[in-house]
Amino acid sequence: MKGFHLVPPLAIQALQHSNVETIIVFRACCPLVVSLLDYAFLGRHLPSASSTFGLLVLVAGAAGYVVSDAEFQLNGWVAYSWVTCYFFIISIEMAYGKYIVGPHLGFKSMWGPTLYTNALSILPMLAIGFLTHEQNRIENIVWSVSASSLLLISCVIGVAISFTGW
């Protein structure tokens, strides 16, 4: 459980000591580590040959980024210390999240964990909304078709991102 609490401060440190592009590149490589953790600890199969090829292409792209990064050329791996910690903790968190919502909950598809984790976030988000007085801002919103459409699109994209995370 401690890993879940480490992610936000590590992400902040990673952002303070590197750029967003570096974090995106490292984060994009998480599926490689997660697939190995899934195999080692959750009894899942290793990725197929085509998936492995895709992961290796991803790693090659990340390696190309690292080699061309001026910060890495000046400081070596020290430049990536925080983002590396973030990378490993978030990879472990992703695999552990799969364990938490694993087969013992009886989900029939990946929509189960997606909707479950999104439903779990409703109460904390409502609490944050009340603590930051969002209810006062709702009164001033003009609910035009374009604003409502953007809200709907944002919700759909958020659920899609959550789904692809599982």
Image (spheres, grey):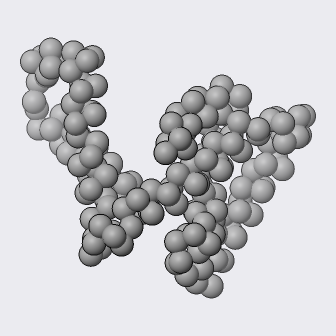
Query: Is residue 1 in view from this perspective?
Result: yes
Quadrant position of residue 84: top right
Up/down of 158 relative to 7, above or below? below
Q: Which one is nearer the viewer's eye here, 160 or 111?
A: 111
Query: Is residue 146 in view from this perspective?
Result: no
Q: Position of residue 68 (x, y in %)?
A: 82, 47
Q: Which one is nearer the viewer's eye here, 155 or 120?
A: 120
Give the residue displayed 37% in from the left and 54% down from the top. Answer: 162
Q: Which one is nearer the viewer's eye here, 157 or 164?
A: 164
Q: Is residue 63 left or right of residue 100?
A: right
Up/down of 159 relative to 105, above or below? above
Give the residue displayed 38% in from the left and 54% down from the top. Answer: 161
Give the residue displayed 9% in from the left and 18% down from the top. Answer: 139
Quadrant position of residue 13: top right
Q: Which one is nearer the viewer's eye here, 41 or 127?
A: 41
Taking the view exactly as shown, the residue that stands out farthest to the bottom is: 49
Quadrant position of residue 79: top right
* Figure label count: 0
Q: Is residue 42 left or right of residue 52?
A: left
Q: Position of residue 157 (x, y in %)?
A: 32, 51
Q: Position of residue 6 (x, y in %)?
A: 56, 37
Q: Is residue 43 left or right of residue 127?
A: right
Q: Quadrant of the C terminus?
A: bottom left
Q: Is residue 142 left or right of residue 130?
A: left
Give the residue displayed 66% in from the left and 77% down from the top. Answer: 53
Q: Position of residue 101 (x, y in %)?
A: 36, 62
